Amino acid sequence: MSDVVIRSATIDDDRALAELDATAWPIELQVTPPRPATEPFFEGRRDVGDVIVAEAPAGIVGYAHIVRHMGIEANAHVLHLNSLAVSPTARGLGLGDQLVEATIAEARRRGARKLGLRAL
């Protein structure tokens, strides 16, 4: 999708991200009960500055969430790709690759020397 922009999330993306999160994860891959699309995306679990979005003309079609792996000083150099989601309607177009590349660039920008990933 050449018309997709990869950018940092803003608080105004909250509703679209909550809706994407509710529809993008197959039930068999969810490690916690699914959150309804009506619940805020950023409330409590995610900081807006830790989310990168893929935005198409029709709206947000993907996101990546990057966080510190552990809250201890010895691990300050380690970040973690906590989650990545692409809308079922936008899969197979390379957006996951673009979001991973943007996450790597963000980790480097933050000075991380290691970026972890746990895949389900």
Image (cartoon, grey):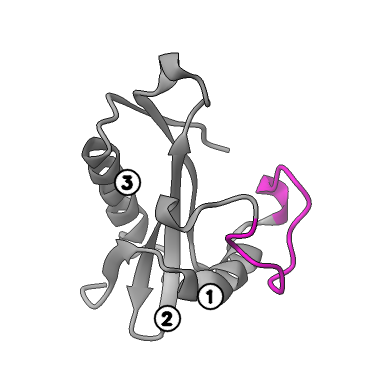
Of helix, strand and loop, which one carries label 1? helix
Going by the numbered disc 3, the residue's amino acid type is Thr
Q: Position of residue 55 (x, y in %)?
A: 35, 73
Q: Is residue 92 above or below residue 68?
A: below
N-terminal label among 2 and 1: 1
Going by the numbered disc 1, the residue's amino acid type is Ala
The residue sitting at 73% across, 61% down in the picture is 35
Determine contact: label 2, label 1, CB under 8 Å: yes
Of helix, strand and loop, which one carries label 2? strand
Q: Residue furthest bottom?
A: 58
Of helix, strand and loop, which one carries label 3? helix
Q: Residues within 10 Å of mark 2 (few under 14, many from 20)?
A: few
In terms of depth relative to the viewer, which is nearer, 51 or 30? 51
N-terminal label among 3 and 1: 1
In terms of depth relative to the viewer, which is nearer, 53 or 1? 53
In terms of depth relative to the viewer, which is nearer, 57 or 71? 71
Determine contact: label 3, label 2, CB under 8 Å: no
- Separation of disc 2 and disc 1 at Cα? 8 Å
The residue sitting at 57% across, 75% down in the picture is 15
Going by the numbered disc 2, the residue's amino acid type is Gly
Query: Which residue carries the number 2 mark?
Result: 59
* Residue 66 forms part of the magenta stretch: no
Magenta extent: 27-43
Query: Which residue carries the number 1 mark?
Result: 16
- Separation of disc 3 and disc 1 at Cα? 20 Å
Q: Is residue 105 above or below residue 78?
A: below
The residue sitting at 75% across, 46% down in the picture is 32
